[in-house]
Amino acid sequence: MTVTFTAGPLTTQLWDRVGPIVKQIEELPFLAQLADGSLDPKAFVNYISQDSLYLNGYAKAMSFLAAKTVDREESRFWAGSAAEAITVEEEMHAELLADARLASALEELTAEGSRFKASPTTLGYVSFLVANAASRAYGEGVASVLPCFWVYAHMGKVLVDRAGQMADDHPYRTWVQTYDSPDFDESTRHAVQILEQELAKAPSEEAARMRAAFEQACVFELHFWASAHAMQNWDASVFLPQGAASV
């Protein structure tokens, strides 16, 4: 697996540590189908709907980091990233849903009675991020939010490589290109550099908690894509014996 965006020995070790998780992400059918354009539009619309809900919480977590750091440059970075996360994604989602295929999928899901509220995985991930950014040490909060930068930037490169020269009518071209851009790469490098600095000065126990938070967030990244593809919801009947009634 190619190592990307590392800022020093500590973040290199950290990326190596989560290598098996990133490999699982790379092998998800959701992403393979996203690259070749064969992904069911309903699954993708479900994904971007969950992503919109997630980003509200993600932006809140980065706002907590902006308030917590004593470094003005880092505060500006987190505050700017929080605002951009919502603005850029809203614009991209609007552009994607202008595609008739995706707009039709949204209409079908709405007609079927689908209400886009946070799935169990989305709620768990957002709760984890906000709690860590608000109540844990600054470095632990940074480690928690970083995978959304780093894993997405990495997968942007993977998907562009898989997709090759995407046709103009590729339904997911806009999404892929958003995460393989110089601006997003630069933001990712900045965030990784902040974590490298925080790891370098953290006491051993705190550094261990930072590494654990980063790894947990990577697991959430894996489950976020997989659960969106599975159209995960709050229907408990899937866990009950056949014929049993759900409350």
Image (cartoon, helix red, strand yellow):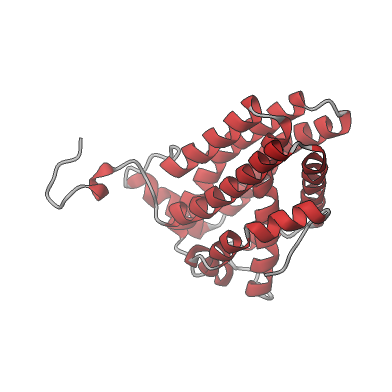
Q: Nearer the viewer, residue 157 or 207?
A: 207
Q: Nearer the viewer, residue 46 or 113?
A: 46
Residue 232 percent location from the top left of the image: 38, 49
Is residue 80 visible from the viewing direction of this image? Answer: yes
Residue 189 percent location from the top left of the image: 81, 51
- In the rendered image, the quadrant that contains the N terminus is bottom right
Location of residue 137 with respect to 160 vertically, above or below = above
Left or right of 101, for residue 20: right
- Disc count in the image? 0
Left or right of 37, for residue 243: left
Q: Nearer the viewer, residue 221 or 17?
A: 17
Location of residue 70 with respect to 214 vertically, above or below = above
Identity of the residue furthest to the front in this view: 204
Left or right of 190, for residue 211: left
Q: Quadrant of residue 143?
A: top right
Left or right of 81, for residue 27: left
Q: Nearer the viewer, residue 96 or 49?
A: 49
Is residue 104 visible from the viewing direction of this image? Answer: no
Residue plotted at (43% across, 56% down): 42
Residue 169 percent location from the top left of the image: 60, 68
Location of residue 157 with respect to 236 vertically, above or below = below
